[in-house]
Amino acid sequence: MIKRPFLWGIGAFVMGILLAWYKIPLIFLVILAFVGWLLIYLFMFPLNKFINRKDIFLWSLPFLIFLGYFAMGEQMKPPDMDMAFREKEACSLTGEVNMIVKKPSGNVYYLKDNKVTLLEGSTYLVENILVYAKDSCEYLIGNQITVSGTIYKFSKNTNPGGFNENLYYKIQNIDYKVYAKEIDLADDNYSKYHFILNKIKRELINSYEKILPEKEAGILMAMVLGEKYLLGDEINSLYQENGISHILAISGLHISLVGAAVYFCLRKLRLGLIVSTLLSLIFIYSYGVLTNFSVSTNRAVVMYSVMLIAKIIGKTFDMLSALSLSAFIILLQNPMEIFNAGFLLSFAAVFGIALLVPCFNILFKSKKILLQSLYTSVCVQIFTLPAILYFFFQISIYSVIINLIILPLTSLLLLTAIVAGVFGFLFYPIAMFVAGGAKYILSFYEFVCTIGSKMPANLLTVGRPDIIRIVLYYLLILIFIYGVNRYKKRSFLLILLFAVGILIFPKQGEGLTVTMLDVGQGEAIYMETGEGLNFLIDGGSIDVNGVGIYRIRPFLLSRGINHIDYAIVTHGDTDHTSGLMELMEDGKIKIVNLILPKIDSSNNRWDREDITINDQDEFKDLKELAAKCKVNLMYIKAGDYIREGKLDITCLHPLEGYMYSSRNAYSTVLSVKYGDFDMLLTGDLEAEGERNITKMPLSQYDVLKVAHHGSKNSTSQEFLKIIKPRLSLISCGKDNRYGHPHEELLERLDDIGSELVITYESGAITIKTDGRRVFMKGYMD
């Protein structure tokens, strides 16, 4: 008889979800189901070797695959209103308040069952909408409110490694966001249950804010209530870098501690087993609602409920079965949760404990508490490693040791946090005394994490692993689990080490890779050779806030890059430098060498009285920041070059002593050659600089980075006739105020037959070459 039918069932259901996500045709699913049923009927049941005839659940597996497939297909359908407007539109709507989240800038209302009227008068029914409000008025869950404002579609990610807002909110089953100008109450009916819970939550929040400093209050509110609006970026980053950010999430520890405490008290009051169990389940469910029911909370509530119910019916609690059941319940409600970082990390951690810890116990046969804690920490790290790398690109080298130090105190911290919060509005002196204990524990956490951050090589930047490596990793882990359980030999640890090696030491790429990132109205080009030498040519934007932190840095980390060998700035405009300066200030990506165009500000021909000599050094801030960050400063002029293997980068402009009339005029121009492949990078060069370059012996180029974002006065007809690029790339923002790319420029490119790719249409544009063959792909293609 096959054990754990729930485990088989969730496997089939997840298979159906993934088949739908990757848009596998339905006919393939039908064939798969037919073959599955045929195998069960012809081979497995007659043999009665592997399967008992009582295992009737096997017949349901193909049905579960179909269920997952159609559930995911339904979830992936865009709302009917998607076709009614492009990106944003003025609207009015009426909806029911389903959840309220407090933010520093105001309240965020989650509305359900919405009736939306667009500007032109058409009306649509929309399931869930997010409303951002700046007013201080707090509505109640269950209220019907009318909102006037602007409705937006969620943006899709256009760069590797970037945040996908559209997928993030799709996972939460949210269709649109609205920035409210005016909100009115349409119906004052409200949920008394949610009102009571919200009142308790507000009292607890007030308690923490009253008895603790802001930093400690923010941490405890995140831990106990799931409220993170006071949680500082600094402490959040510190915890994440050291691998302990999981303590900030509502998880199984919270549910088991709260649930066990309530259950114990009820049994001490001599209430019956069933009554105590039911009341305990109601309490932990209410706690889940109070904390906005994150996916980890959902998992923990289901598993704890299964454990209590198992007690009532006299059955043994099985962690894997309970885990599988909770996954099925969550995914049945919303199949998109399969791509939620919280879902994957939460379930992977518990699977690691359930599957790997017993293997370590078999191999080492130690009952010591310290070693048991070490096994648990290692097993959680092993099983969650692919998800950590996929979403965060880095791992903390010392996280296992830090967790060994931190985790023993976490239960005490949580207990003191709950007691302090409750007594904060019951008896203030006790609350202050208990909160002091919590504060000391948090200070100790910060002390340990600070030491961890200062340790050498505390973060290993691996990048985002591909799906093939992730699948191979888990297959090797399954082989390890099977081998240990069957043969009980420590030699199987080599398989585990090999699996980890495959994931964290990927094969080095070959050839030359060039990526023009989508940074809106700006420019950032990354180049990398197979030998590991990398370059960043420019990095800035004028319409994307924090472009260095939110677009360039995630891209680099996703590729496993934690340093830039050469950052080359073509000229001093903000749309080419802002992101680079942010990277230097942030410090997480080390800039080794900064290369600026070699110009003399006394050689300018700017005929403007408002410009002083100091103002003319447009690199002043950049130079000062480079000196502060200990970046080696270099200069480049026409004739200078960088050569490494097959790579040859030669500077064509500016000439030494060049007299320039604007920043664009002295833009650095680079001729990049790799074997037979060549590419011309032109910065914001305009006609004046082009005339100087055309005097040089130029050949035809495979790829041209069109100058000045495709402006009218750059990339002239004469220039194009000489270089005749097969492919032309333009970096600019959609619907930008400059009208880039200009219609006349597009006509000039069309006249010479050059294929055109624009970042706002294709997202990041990646070109790969081995020196002979050239491959190009847009991230959104």
Image (cartoon, rainbow, N blue to C red):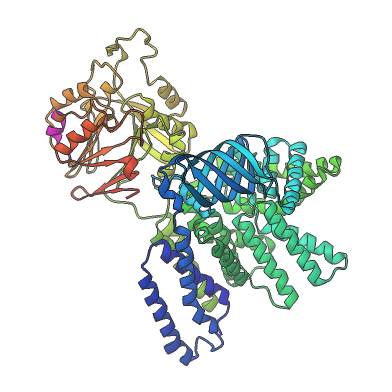
Q: Quadrant of residue 708?
A: top left
Residue 388 lies left or right of residue 705; in this view the side is: right
> Can see residue 361?
no
Which stretch appears magenta? 718-725
Q: Where is residue 14 in the image (x, y as percent from the top left)?
A: 49, 67
Residue furthest front as drawn:
121
Q: In this view, does 647 lie above or below 406?
A: above
Q: Nearer the viewer, residue 516 or 758?
A: 758
Q: Position of residue 594 (x, y in %)?
A: 36, 30
Residue 371 lies left or right of residue 198; in this view the side is: left
State which quarter of the image contains the N terminus.
Answer: bottom right
The residue positioned 37% from the left and 10% from the top of the image is 613
Q: Position of residue 158 (x, y in %)?
A: 39, 45
The residue positioned 42% from the left and 80% from the top of the image is 36
Count of picture labels? 0
Residue furthest top as drawn:
609
Q: Quadrant of residue 162?
A: top left
Residue 267 lies left or right of residue 52; in this view the side is: right
The residue positioned 58% from the left and 77% from the top of the image is 4
Residue furthest right as drawn:
269
The residue positioned 50% from the left and 44% from the top of the image is 117
Q: In this view, does 51 lie above or below 317?
A: below
Q: Position of residue 329 (x, y in %)?
A: 59, 66
Magenta: predominant secondary structure element? helix
Q: Nearer the viewer, residue 181 or 730?
A: 181
> Can see residue 228?
yes
Q: Residue 735 magenta-drawn?
A: no
Residue 328 lies left or right of residue 626; in this view the side is: right
